[in-house]
Amino acid sequence: MLELRNLSQFCALLLILTAAANVSPRLQTSETARQAPTMTASAAGADVPTGETRIAGRQALPIWPAGPLSPAFFGMHIQRPDIAWPKVNGGLGAVRIWDAGAQWADIAPAKGVFNWDALDAHVSRARANGADVIMNLGRTPRWASARPAEPSAYGPGQAAEPALDQYWQDWVRAVATRYQGKIRYWEVWNEPNDTAFFSGSAEKLVDLARQAYFILKTSNPDNQVLSPSPYNVNYLDYYLSLGGGDYADVIGYHFYLAEAPEALATWYIPSVRAVLTQRGQADKPLWNSEGGYLRPAVPGPKTLSDETGAAYLARAYLLNWTGGVSRFYFYAWDNHTATNIELTAADNTTLTAAGVAYRELSGWLLGAQLSELRVDEAGVWILTFDHPTHGQAYIVWHPTETIVFDLPAAWQVQALRSLAGAHMSLSGQRQLAVGPAPLLLESSPVHSLYLPTVSGPTQSGALGRQEWGR
């Protein structure tokens, strides 16, 4: 059994294991699904590809987060500037501006002309609800583009670097000045490993980051700059090898998945952390500035059921947290054409099963302090944490099947909460049915044996009262 309990030890091993590993580039356009990567995660205890850490019985997985979990961890993309703020009980603390009608090409249709209406609306709504904002600086207007006829995900010329550095500097200075004290987080570019989003060289991108960094810090020393966020670990490695980390306070990465979320723990996050360690950037926060699940074909139907989508969303947030990812910006709250996990109905307000899961999970975890993540011999993932009001608690799930789980007497479990909002007593019960949807187990008793879903739909296939345990 392999035991790794600190970041330096784990990353040193991963550097050896991943030296020859390769992450295949995945074709992507705006609202176009990425192809599945060549590596795949496996169920607990099964064989895994070279470079992954085996999940064995009773193995404690490396964890890095420090401090209680804040609402800023539960980030989100909200595309439309005119919809109501999500009703998730204060569990949304950060938004990223992308695919929101408020990028450089949207705001500046001509040199010296700015239309700030959409970005004003996004920023005002976020600030009114206590959320901070990441502004992505990319998408060159055609008039400013080095290659104005070149195709891109959004229109001709928008993936190219600016034709003149002065165009870039004027844009960064204008947006930083307008939102001084209102936007603190700035991301240099979106997914530069993909030519549909950035067709210039990595060397030029480092130079653009350098220019933006000094302008933003001059505008407000409290500004924090995110590195350009790829979804390819080799591109991240090359960008940092060029000195790109010198112009970043936060490392951005896009952890999109095509497989079960446990791949975050067994491959994706450790691979990125190994690169950060090798390039001297391990002490900086790592943010998943865009992630989730995209449909295999766009346009095309969803391929994940509502039940699976809710479980995957919750497990993805949990495993970003246990992997030490400081923030996770899910894509997207009001998207109904590209995401394989829809959080709202067509009215962009009514919560789906996944939307309810997002609300419930944030309620479970706000203020929590992570203690341990491990996988037992039966393949049950067990997350232990301390909550400021409820004390020690546990979240359990099995990625692939529903099994009977023996409740350890030492846990003193008194109550259970589900992602659908159910809250019931487990007093005196010794066993529990555990499946792909994470369950919260608490030591605080409930006064009623069973409380129905707080709001939103009941999760399809959820266990009934007599099936929770015995």
Image (cartoon, rainbow, N blue to C red):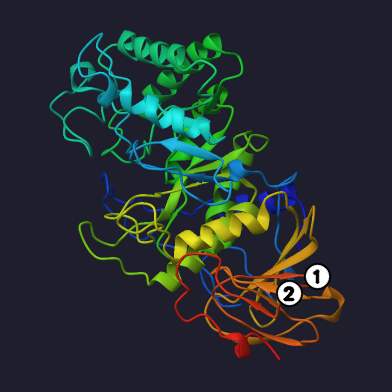
The picture places residue 174, in percent across and down from the top left corner, at: 39, 11
Classify 10 Å Cα crowding around label 2: few (below 14), some (14-19), many (20 and above).
Answer: many
| Quadrant of the image containing the N terminus | bottom right
- Residue lying furthest left: 149
Q: Is residue 143 above or below residue 265?
A: above
Q: Residue at x 57, y 32 (%)?
A: 250
Q: Which element type, helix, strand or loop, lies under badge 2?
A: strand
Residue 51 visible here: no
Write the residue at 29% across / 54% down: 338
Q: Which residue is mark 2?
A: 415
Q: Residue furthest right?
A: 410
Q: Quadrant of the C terminus?
A: bottom right
Is residue 197 left or right of 136 when viewed as pictured? left
x and y percent of residue 238 in the render? 46, 35
Q: Are marks 2 and 1 in contact (CB under 8 Å)?
A: yes
Q: Nearer the viewer, residue 49 or 316?
A: 316
Residue wearing tag 1: 443
Mark 1 crowd level (few <14, some 14–19, many ≥20, 10 Å Cα): some
Badge 2 amino acid: Ala
Amino acid identity at mark 1: Ser
Picture quadrant where residue 414 is located: bottom right
Q: Secondary structure at mark 1?
A: loop
> In terms of image quadrants, where is residue 392?
bottom right
Picture coordinates of residue 49, whole percent (x, y): 51, 67
Work out whether 317 lies above or below 277: below
